[in-house]
C-alpha cells in the first residue's frame, strides 16, 4: 500500500437549466459525495437551478450570462481546494462507490494525470432512442483502450495543478461540444497519462429524441471534432475512431450508393446486399451487446440508427475537413464555432 496521503477531491458540476435531472444529480451527490467539496456553477440559468444547489448546502458560483460548460468548469476549478478535480455533468447521477474509485485511482497511481469513466448500462430515460444512444456510449467506452487518448467532461477527474497548468478547458467552445476532447489532446501532447477506468460509471438521465440527438451529434460533436482531429492530427485507433468504425463509415456510404444505383442497374442489388452483410458482420459484436442487454427486437431496431450514425458522421467529417482546409488556406479568416441552442 502506498504511503502517500489520500488526495482530496473537489466535485465540479456546471448547470444550465438542469430541471428534474439536476435534482437527481444533486440527490446522488448528497448521498454519495458528502465528504467531498462540491461546487455547482450555475451557467446563466433561468430556472433557479442554483437555488436547488444552495438548498442542498453546496457551494454555488453564478455566471449571469451563459458562457458554456467550459467556462463554468474553469470557474469552479479555480475556486476549488481539492487536489483532484472531478467533473460531473448536471444530467448524471454518481454511484455509491464513484468517489472512492476516483480517490483510489489517483492515490495508487502517482503518475496518473487524469481518468475518465463511462455511462452505466441502465440509462435513466426509458424511450428507445435514449436507451440506444446511452448503451452505445457505454459499449464504446467499455471496449476502449485503458490507456485513454482523450478526456471526458461528464465523468472525468484530473489533478488540479495539471489542469490549471494547461489552462483548463478552451472557453472558445461556448456550448456543450468537444472542449473535453480538446483538453485530452493537450494532455497527451504534454506527455501526461489519461486512464479509462471501466468500473467508474455514472448514470445518464438525458432523454434523447430524433431532433435533439441529430443536432447534438452533428453540430456539437462531429463537426468541431473533425476540425480538431485535423488540427492536432489525432487519428487514434480508439473509441469512436477505431479502424472498424472507419471501415463501417465507408461501407455505409457504399451501401447507400448501391441502393441508389439500383434505379439504374439491377446488378447494384447484389452489391448492396454484399456491403450490408459485411457491415453487419463487422458490427456484430455491438448488435450482440444490444441483444444481451435489451433483447433481440431492440437489437434489430438499433441497426438503422447505427447505420445512420455513420452516414451523418461521414457527412460531418467531409464538411469539417473542407472547413478546416479552407480556413487554413485563407489564414486571415478564422472558423467560427457554431453556437446553436440546445433547446
Image (cartoon, rainbow, N blue to C red):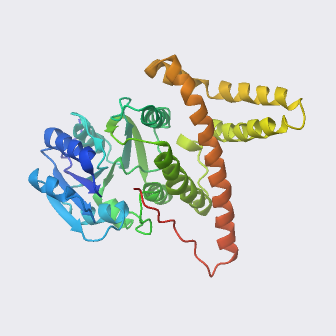
User: Looking at the picture, how far across and down is residue 294, in whole percent?
Assistant: 44, 21
The residue positioned 17% from the left and 38% from the top of the image is: 32
At horizontal 66% and vertical 51% (from top left) the residue drawn is: 315
Residue 16 to residue 200: above or below: below
- Work out whether residue 89 or residue 233 is closer to the camera in this orientation and state it: 89
On screen, residue 278 versus residue 200, left or right, reads right
Q: Quadrant of residue 274?
A: top right
112 or 269: nearer the viewer: 269
- Counting the numbered discs, the total is 0
> What residue appears at the point 48 percent right and 59 percent down from the top-left corner?
182
State the image coordinates of residue 90 (x, y, percent, origin top left): 29, 49
Instruction: Find residue 170 and report its horizontal and vertical position in percent.
Output: 42, 66
Res. 307 in view: yes
Q: Is residue 207 above or below residue 284?
A: below
Figure quadrant of the N terminus: top left
Q: In the image, is residue 46 above or below residue 111?
A: below
Residue closest to the far bottom: 332
Q: In this view, does 213 lie to the left or right of 250?
A: left
119 versus 211 height, above or below: above
* Residue 289 seen in the current view: no
Residue at x-position 24% and y-position 61%: 42
* Residue 102 placement: quadrant: top left
> In the image shown, does 140 or 122 lie closer to the viewer?
122
- Picture quarter containing residue 269? top right
Amino acid at each position: 500500500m502506498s504511503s502517500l496521503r489520500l488526495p482530496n477531491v473537489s466535485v465540479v458540476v456546471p448547470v444550465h437549466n438542469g430541471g428534474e435531472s439536476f435534482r437527481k444529480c444533486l440527490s446522488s451527490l448528497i448521498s454519495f459525495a458528502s465528504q467531498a467539496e462540491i461546487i455547482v456553477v450555475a451557467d446563466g440559468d433561468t430556472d433557479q437551478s442554483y437555488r436547488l444547489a444552495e438548498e442542498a448546502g453546496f457551494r454555488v458560483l453564478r455566471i449571469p450570462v451563459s458562457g458554456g460548460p467550459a467556462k463554468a468548469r474553469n470557474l469552479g476549478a479555480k475556486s476549488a481546494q481539492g487536489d483532484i478535480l472531478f467533473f460531473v455533468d448536471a444530467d448524471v447521477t454518481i454511484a455509491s462507490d464513484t468517489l472512492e474509485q476516483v480517490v483510489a485511482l489517483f492515490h495508487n497511481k502517482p503518475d496518473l494525470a487524469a481518468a475518465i469513466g463511462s455511462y452505466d448500462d441502465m440509462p435513466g430515460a426509458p424511450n428507445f432512442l435514449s436507451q440506444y444512444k446511452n448503451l452505445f456510449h457505454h459499449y464504446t467506452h467499455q471496449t476502449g483502450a485503458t490507456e485513454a487518448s482523450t478526456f471526458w467532461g461528464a465523468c472525468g477527474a484530473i489533478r488540479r495543478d495539471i489542469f490549471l497548468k494547461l489552462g483548463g478547458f478552451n472557453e472558445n467552445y461556448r456550448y456543450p461540444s468537444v472542449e473535453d476532447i480538446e483538453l485530452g489532446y493537450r494532455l497527451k501532447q504534454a506527455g501526461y497519462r489519461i486512464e479509462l477506468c471501466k468500473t467508474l460509471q455514472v448514470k445518464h438521465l438525458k432523454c434523447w429524441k430524433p431532433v435533439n440527438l441529430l443536432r447534438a451529434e452533428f453540430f456539437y460533436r462531429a463537426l468541431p471534432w473533425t476540425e480538431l482531429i485535423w488540427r492536432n492530427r489525432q487519428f487514434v485507433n480508439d473509441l469512436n475512431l477505431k479502424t472498424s468504425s472507419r471501415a463501417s463509415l465507408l461501407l455505409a456510404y457504399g451501401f447507400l450508393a448501391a441502393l441508389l444505383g439500383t434505379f439504374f442497374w439491377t446488378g447494384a442489388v447484389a452489391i448492396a446486399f454484399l456491403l450490408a452483410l459485411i457491415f453487419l458482420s463487422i458490427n456484430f459484436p455491438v448488435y450482440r451487446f444490444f441483444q444481451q442487454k435489451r433483447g433481440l427486437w431492440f437489437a434489430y431496431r438499433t441497426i438503422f440508427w447505427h447505420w445512420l450514425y455513420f452516414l451523418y458522421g461521414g457527412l460531418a467529417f467531409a464538411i469539417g475537413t473542407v472547413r478546416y482546409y479552407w480556413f487554413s488556406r485563407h489564414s486571415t479568416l478564422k472558423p467560427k464555432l457554431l453556437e446553436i441552442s440546445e433547446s
